[in-house]
Image: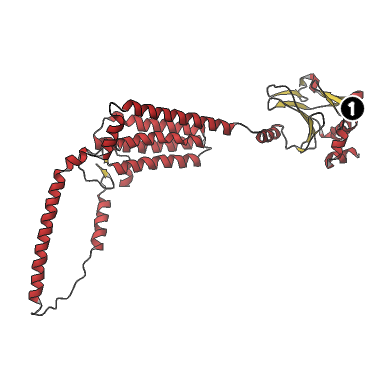
Amino acid sequence: MQLLKSLFCLRGFDNRVRFITIKFFCLVSFIVLNEVFVTAIFAAVISLIICLAVSVTTTQRRLNDAQLHRNWILAPTGSFLISGVIVIFIGHGSIYWLLLIPLLLSLLLLTYPSTKKRDYILGYNGPVDLSEYLTKTHSGSSTSQRIEPTMNQMNSAEQPIHLEQNNSATLNTDRTSSALHTHYESSSNNISHGESNDIGESIRLALFSNRNAQITISVVVFLVALAMIISLIFAGENNTPTTESIKIVEKKDTNTELQHHITLPDNFSLMVSTYNGLVISWQADSAENQELWNIGNAQGDTSCQSILFNKGDTIRSYQVNIENNNQYFAHFSPLDTTALVKNIAFKGKFSLCGYEFSLKGSQAVLGKTAFYANLLEY
């Protein structure tokens, strides 16, 4: 529980390792949760808010540790918020690269060293008490160094030798302690020099010095813009419906699962609904999706209310739609299916919705399909 409290503490200090670990965990957690709640936008937004809250607090603790101005919190956390919202609402996997922006801005904060020497527990120093984790660590190390008792059965001849060995060991220990003390003082004297040569500090100065700052920013902006354009292009290609997907949508939009699809010589198709109602389909000039005729309200284009064969045979349609912007679907009653198939097989032509189709060669095509051939035998 204390460890969880330390994640939301604003007044503490995070060292570099803890800061980047939490940042990386927040980004990965958001990606996983967004994939889990891919169809639930509200849950995905909640997961983004939680990950963002943890990201904000660890950024503030890192700023405290490096004694940087609070305005620094806007860049990594603001970019995380904007990138997360875009990822949620665009919903395309190729856009996850945007999360690299807050990660790179967080890496920039790693270049600033801690301004003071602090006692960190699990990378944290602050008002939340994490000493229980330190106690567990010490107790574990003490147990691992347990000394087994021995029986003191030395005789008088062995005792002087043992005392001499102890004196020698004591002398060696004093010499070692003196050397370590000297080494510690030398290291302490060089702390300020080591901080001045911090590798993170050197990288930041090399990239963002007065001379190189404009070049670095220009390169980053160019790469971000290029990546955005490429991802949008790929997203557009993936969202463009293929011919096969159009056919699937076409079948769904015709209100039934259409079967026995055949194409006649004059470029129109026949299909049958699950209720054995015949559907005639053909491609026409570009037009908006709409309902052209419906027998239920007897309204619409009157040229679509009936199919007219040569020699005067007429059969009424009950619905005619335009789907996929240029595809006509004329639905007929199951009671008229047999009559329609026979007329299409034995007549010379028909007209529907202002379009005229030749029926030359239709009988041969219908006879090769078992379903339609069976209707012709009635």
In which quarter of the view is residue 238 placed?
Answer: top right
Quarter of the picture containing the C terminus is top right
Q: How crowded is mark 1: few (under 14 residues within 10 Å), some or many (20 or more)?
A: some
Residue at left offset 84%, top offset 36%? 365
Residue at left offset 8%, top offset 71%? 164
Q: In this view, does 128 lie above or below 145?
A: above
Residue designated by label 1: 348
User: What colour scheme has been applied to the protein in the rendered image?
Assistant: secondary structure
Taking the image as shown, residue 239 lies to the left or right of residue 330, namely left
Taking the image as shown, residue 227 lies to the left or right of residue 150, namely right
Q: Can residue 345 be seen in this view?
A: yes
Of helix, strand and loop, which one carries label 1? Answer: loop
Q: Residue 51, position in %: x, y?
A: 40, 38
Q: Is residue 279 visible?
A: no
Query: Label 1 sits on what residue type?
Result: Gly
Q: Residue 118, position in %: x, y?
A: 21, 43
Identify which residue, 369 or 55, lies in the foreground.
369
Q: Residue 305, position in %: x, y?
A: 80, 23
Q: In this view, does 173 lie above or below 276?
A: below
